[in-house]
Image: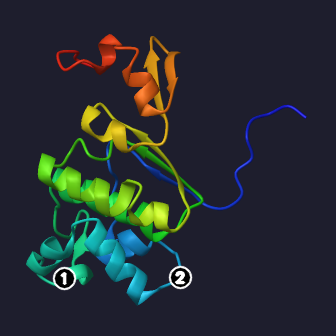
Amino acid sequence: GGGGPIVRGRVAYCSQVPWIVAGSVRENIVFGSPWDEQWYGAVVRACCLTDDLAGLPAGDATELGERGVNLSGGQKARVALARACYSRPAVALLDDPLSAVDPRVGRDLFSGAIGPGGLLAACGATRLLVTHQRQYLPKCDRVLVLRGGAVAALGPWRQVAELKLPELTAGHGG
């Protein structure tokens, strides 16, 4: 006995500061998983990368890193999210992946990749989303509010919203 929960299957982690390895855009997304062209296309669309890839000199074969093209913060965030999605994880740990993108792209990423109708949910992933953006909370199964490292609230959004916590009011800085 003892210990924490056991996770069976792959865990994908999308850090708050996205990281990119030297290599092509495709290599950064596929990242050692088996190649699946249909799934790759679905991931690129869900992560709002279609236009970005079309604008790169060699599309998804464009080299990134020290000798290659530098992506914007928002592009890096979307490539990192695409990597997490492409791996078809059992659990996806998403540390504020929407903070580097504009609100419209954020909504598209949430609906296409992260939220209940997104790719991660479609492949059965448990999604843990860390965010300061309250607009996504009503679409989450459960909401956990932390205050000073301790649990201030945990439950379905409707229940947590009724508590009227300062962390969840519009003027609160997070």
- Mark number, residue 74: none
Q: Which residue is mark 2?
A: 34
Quadrant of residue 41 within the rendered picture: bottom left
Q: Residue at 36%, 13% (x, y): give it.
A: 165
Residue that label 1 marks: 59
Residue at left offset 36%, top offset 69%: 28
**Quadrant housing the C terminus:** top left
Task: Name the amino acid, label 2.
Answer: Pro
Could you tell me which secondary element the residue under label 2 belongs to? loop
Q: Nearer the viewer, residue 131 or 100?
A: 131
- Res 53 → quadrant: bottom left
Q: Secondary structure at mark 1?
A: helix
10 Å crowding of disc 1: few (<14), some (14-19), many (20+):
some
* Above-or-below relation of 54 to 77: below
- Measuring from the top left, give residue 93's x and y in whole percent: 49, 47
Q: Is residue 38 above or below residue 164?
A: below
Q: How is the image coloured?
A: rainbow
Residue at point 16%, 68% (across, down): 69
Instruction: Name the spot of residue 157 as percent of width and height, x first.
Output: 42, 32
Residue drawn 27% across the image and 57% down it: 109
